[in-house]
Amino acid sequence: MYLKYILTGIALLIGGLLAVQGSINSQLGGLLRNPLQAAFVNFFVGTIILLAINVFAKTELPAKETLKAIPLYLFIGGVMGAVYVSSAIILIPKIGVATMLGASIGGQMIVASIIDHYGFFNITVHAISPGRIAGIILLIIGVFLIQRF
């Protein structure tokens, strides 16, 4: 029971990193005078870090057969990450960190609720409820309030 709260707290802290990441990447984009180059630097540094972690953890590379068996759509996550980071770098200077992340989180919650409700991508079904719908509506209202004030 407590583990769920601890993990939720960790997720909250990680969410805070997104605000810092977006701000740093946006500043980098300004210095490089190109948001796509800033996104490239972001992913290049991330790749180096993940490579080092994998080497340190002595993880094994997947077998060729394992990679061939993975449905192609499962590799789209990298594309989505590139779109998200690049878009954040472009949007943050124009609409601010809070508005960008608030709108992003609102979009995530809407799509996440649909995924949960229908069990897409082999996710355990969590039916949408009036409480979840109210939460999404409040998030969207929050985004408009953040943008307005």
Image (tube, rainbow, N blue to C red):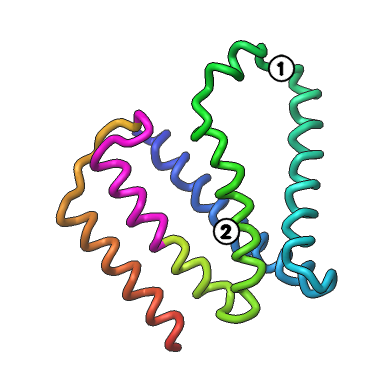
The kind of residue tagged 2 is Gly
The residue that disc 2 covers is: 16
Q: Secondary structure at mark 1?
A: loop
Position of residue 104 measured from the top left corner of the image (x, y, whole percent): 47, 63
The residue that disc 1 covers is: 61
Q: Residue at x 30, y 49 (%)?
A: 113
Mark 1: few/some/many CA within 10 Å (<14, 14-19, 20+)? few
**Quadrant housing residue 5:** top left
Q: Residue at x 81, y 31 (%)?
A: 52
Along the horizontal axis of the image, is 111 left or right of 30?
Answer: left
* Magenta part of the chain: 106-122
Spatial CA span between label 1 and label 2 = 31 Å
Name which of mark 1 and mark 2 comes first in the sequence. Answer: 2
The kind of residue tagged 1 is Leu
Compared with 44, 131 (above or below) is below
Position of residue 1 measured from the top left corner of the image (x, y, whole percent): 34, 33
